[in-house]
Amino acid sequence: MSVQTEGVTVALPADGLVAVVKQDCPTCRLVEPVLAALPQVAVFSQDDPAFPADVADRRDDTALDASLALDIDTVPTLIRFAGGVEVERTVGWLQTAWAALTGIEGLGADLPDYRPGCGSRTHDPDVAEELLVRTRGGTLTSRRLEIAALEDEHEAMYDRGYSDGLPVVAPTPARVLRMLDGTSRAPSDVVAVIPPNLVEATVEKVAINAVMAGCKPEYLPVVLAAVEAACTNEFNAHGLLATTWGAGPAIVVNGPVAAEIGMNAKGNALGQGNRANSTIGRALQLVIRNVGGGRPGEVDRAALGHPGKIGFCFAEDEEGSPWEPLAETYGVAPGRSAVTVFAAEGPRGVTDQISRTPESLARSFALGLRAVGHPKLVIGFDATLVVCPEHARVFAQAGWDRARLMAELDALLLLDRREIERGAGGIEEGVPVSDSDRPLPKFRPGGLQIVHAGGGAGMFSAAIGGWAGGPGGSQPVTREVDPWR
Amino acid sequence: MAVTTTSFEILDPTDERAPDSRVALERPESLDGLRVGLLDISKTRGDVFLDRLEELLSERGIAVRRYAKPTFTKPMPPDLRREITTHCDVVIEALAD
């Protein structure tokens, strides 16, 4: 009889006893005379091939192939085979269990009744990585590249063009396999077709780039959902990449997953210092760069770009919000985790430390939002308003829900044509001159979204300009996270 | 893992359209209009060989830039490599032995 693991075949007796031990384990040493006294037993030793010394059929399992094939968690493990099939096993030393399994009454009766075993060497940290790759490396299909002995691994990543300018974590098979533990999806599952080169990205390719970005495995479902959302026709990642405008993809995370993976929705939510915030957005951008082939100076034609194009991701502060989560406004059921991707420039602060009425504060927001793109241009650009807690409190106390604030902003952002026409204010830029007196809305319907985030102190919200909105540009896209867990 | 003494593997993060190893540039048909560098790796008499090459190239109206590694026993300093790639289209290296 033989059992196969990763191309290695382990010979086992079809009938009879098999034990797996290691010399380092006191219980294994305790049962050494018992094993030696058994009339027939094949003993696999995980560490010392000379142990147990008095056993006739002693087998070297320092490579751990038999231990893996037998799925050993604890040593000693004693197994009985009959007709090529395992029929019984016991772990550790329990005199009655060993006697029952072997059918030898009084076996080891001079030993203590019971001693627990030790952890199998297959679980030792020093071999865990190598075993992980040996047992599951075959599930990975990406091309393997050699980093030579004299290459600095970080320099090698740069030299090969894999970096966004910051160091990346080398995606070794072991790291990628650990990343893949973050999802139940198969490595070969296709996540999306990635622009600009329209390449199918598998879960494995996304996991590789998530490793490089610095993600932890539990972030992977969020990254996968973000990749799925960004590669929709509605979001139009290709256009957003190719435009000379400087916006890039941003991600806002809603639902329980944000807290589960330790995302920051509070102080400095849009800034640095939180691993999940910083690496999830980066992973999306690395997927577009490495899998999709979207690189600055090539298809990325941004005149300026902005620092958040390295990665821009934050969680909505739902706990302190007077409003329903953003994802709910896009139709996701309450309590579900979701990502919303949207086109984003860098955030620009909107200060108002005086207003205590919602009417006054809404006017400040409207002025701040009016500057998106250009104060004299309308409809072209979408925007996201991030309302900080001290501002949100003003609306909460006045009973303004999100829809009310949105409606008030829409009204405040109906602009007088005469003020924004070309030439008005001595500025050539502006909307074309027309006879119409109809005021013009700053944003298209659905072109403004409101998110709640930030620290408890500071009456500073933020306007995040977007890009060309609507079907001809980019629309925010929401996708649930759970299908990618 | 920052300093390794053995090679290790990574998984390709790209669409795998590009070859996994670099290929040498095609040899130019002629040196006309190209910037030529002469690199001495600092082995004995490399300079003699390169002096003669410089003479021959100058006769053909081709100006050269001269470079030398500090020592043949170690890899080229990155700054020198960068300088050469910035200033030259082709390089002739004198291995001397």
Image: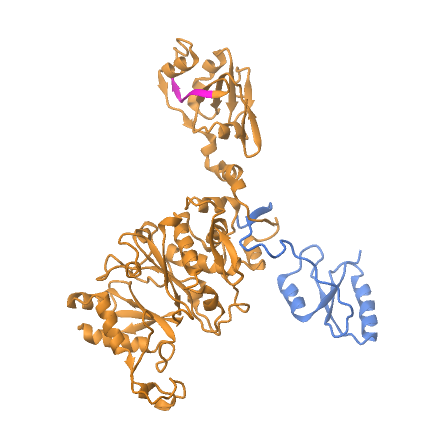
Task: Say if residue A52 shows up in the picture.
Answer: no
Left or right: where B72 falls relative to A323: right
> On screen, A379 above or below A27?
below
Residue B51 image-quadrant placement: bottom right
Measured as percent of width and height from the top left, residue A251 is found at 38, 61
Chain that the image shows in blue: B
In depth, the one of A198 and B7 nearer the eye is A198
Measured as percent of width and height from the top left, residue A352 is found at 24, 74
Residues in magenta, as a range:
A86-94
> In this figure, what is the number of numbered marks?
0
Identify the residue at horizontal 36%, vertical 14% (top origin). A96
> On screen, A456 above or below A382?
above
Secondary structure mostly seen in the magenta stretch: strand
Task: Say if residue A215 shows up in the picture.
Answer: yes
Left or right: where A319 falls relative to A79: left
> On screen, A159 above or below A143?
below
Residue extending furthest left? A398
Question: Is residue A40 inside the magenta stretch?
Answer: no
In depth, the one of B37 and A260 nearer the eye is A260
Residue A90 image-quadrant placement: top left
